Amino acid sequence: MTTLAREPRSRLDPEPMSRRDMLGLSSLWMTAGSLLFALVGALRLPKAAVLDSPNKKVRLSLPEALAAGTSFVPAGRSMAVFRDAEGVFAISTVCTHLGCIVKPTAEGFECPCHGSRFAADGSVTRGPAPQPLRWLKVSASGGQWVVDEAAIVPAGTKVNA
Amino acid sequence: MTSEATSRSALSEFADNLRAAPRRIRETAFRSGTPNTDRTRSTFVFGNVFLHLHSVRVHRWSLRWLTTAGLGIASVAAFLITLVTGVLLMFYYKPYPDVAYASIKDIHFVVPTGRFMRNIHRWAANVMVVTVILHMARVFYTAAYRSPREFNWLIGLALFVTTLGLSFTGYLLPWDQLAFWATTIGANIAQSPREVTDALGVTDIFDPGGIQRLLLLGSDTVGPEALIRFYLLHVMILPLVLTTLLAVHVWRIRKDGGLAKPVDADDRLGPLSQTYPVFTEAPAKTYHLAAVVRGRTEVVNRGPEQTVPSMPHLFYAELAVAMLTVAVCLALALVSDAPLKEVANPLVPENPAKAPWYFLGLQELVSFSAFMGGIGIPAIVILGLALIPYLDREDQQTGDWFGGPGGWRLVQRSIVVGLGSVLALEAVAIRFGWLREWFPDIPQLVVTLVNPATILTLVYGAYSVWLMRRHASARAGALGLFTCFLCGFLVLTIIGTYFRGPNWVFYWSPADWPRH
């Protein structure tokens, strides 16, 4: 329905927008827009670009007597290193559920926080963990072993010297 | 000669002004004169920036103990106590790993009254969580969220979430084992949308969980960056948010026409024993500020006889509640010390690692699924609570305890259903395990969607829909749902607090916990 310009306007009808109001409103919106833009820019600050994490690689030598199925936990690291007939492998002991440190046991691993259990190969046997424990990349280096906590390898990857 | 006279009179005028200065300072501070009559007290309340958050006169119904039990004011009082004691603790606290732990130890053992202040801070925070939850239950069960108070219910919800946020951020600051692992778990709950994005295989391109965790911790581990962020949130950002919301919350009570009361509140109260004439002459017509204060007015053909001046009646009541809160916090602080465990060890979590009691219900839920328990179901609950005033547009029995179709009997029945279903589901999960134990190869998405937590939510939802159809009333459904969720929260919290031992295994008593 179109209204003719000359039709008498009721007192109850909203007034048509004058040029002054139009300009005022658009500058108001531009102010709001630029403030919003500035806010988004300011919020970029809390998102860290450089993380203060320590070196993810650890060099270690395994004890000669390390039996298959027994874990070796390097000091200060959340990982368990194993050696069996097929080679050396490392499993992260950070629970895939909410990040607690799981404890190696005779049957596998158990998490103290929410009761997840893992088999010796890291697969979930019960509890809320959504994924198996991560296998970490192991490489041989001059008679020692280097484990990279940042590099995840498929489960079952074992390395020989 | 004239100049000498003028200078003498100027000097004596100066002396007079100096003598009058104390009186004038007092007079200008109280613009309307000493508040010693109803009239001057009213103008005093009206003209004071803090007091004018209250209305000048308050209805007698609002002053009954049964109307509010003083729970809102108790929450405010507890917040003020944490504010004062928190500022005092900031004199010695240093937000840096290990140094933080040492400074808390200093506060505990060396600083004069340090241990007492920390105890009060901790207990006031606990009291605040309890009173905020009870206050919300009071507003819900008296249907006080109804028009025109809908939006104030939303602000109240935001205050509830902020309160929990303040508690949680305060938890990391001592940098003990409890602090470190509660924060690790909290940050990973923020990351838990990955449980879904991983299952769908889209984490590489769409990772809201990772961004949330990064923003919270400022790093990929809980370390100095995380501690300073939690400190900033705890002492600056969240208190500012809470104070702002609180001012709006209290202001809106006044603007929405005071506390909710039954339509026939005046008749139920009976006549006042002592009359407070509001108008010195009998009003020829009725006055009310319909355009300024929303809500129905009862002021038709009679003056507002059922109201009394806020000063002193309301203020005495508020002071009494505040003093009671202070007394409770002090007593608790004298009886029980705030805990401080060993210094944080990122390699060995506590076993069991338990969050503060009000998060143990959530911890029980995340032990089924991190995403559903930590984010999905809390979001559903908050959204459901937020929608209540917009879905329940009825007006019967507003202001009455358990008012609405079904009433107290419906609430009783809902308590049985609420307790029964949570206990049954927990019993099954504890006795027989869940899907993962039965079908080890089941996809994660199925476990995320079908677990005791989601089934419980569905049962409660279905029960509430059934109530709504049976009573043909949204209020009946809301009464059932709110009661059920309260029961669920209670049972899960109790199980998490008293019946979960090492590795989150169920034990009837801590005496049964394995020694090592």
Image (spheres, rainbow, N blue to C red):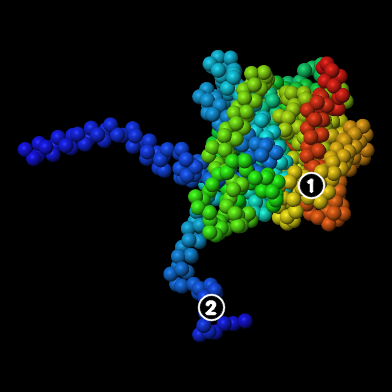
Residue drawn at 29 percent across, 34 percent down: B20
Q: Would you place residue B391 above or below residue B454 in this image?
A: below
Dot 2: chain letter: A
Residue beneath label 1, please?
A: B479
Above or below residue B233? Residue B380 is below
Q: Are marks 2 and 1 on the same chain?
A: no
Residue B430 picture quarter: top right
Relative to the observer, which residue lies in front, A64 or A98? A98
Number of labelled discs?
A: 2
Residue drawn at x 63%, y 54% as measured from the top left: B298
- Residue A128 horizontal/vertical position (percent): 82, 36
Foreground pick, B144 / B289: B289
The answer to whether residue B149 is seen in the rendering is yes
- Host chain of mark 1: B
Q: Which mark is residue A10?
A: 2
Q: CA distance from mark 2 to mark 1?
A: 48 Å
Q: Work out whether B180 lies above or below B56.
A: above
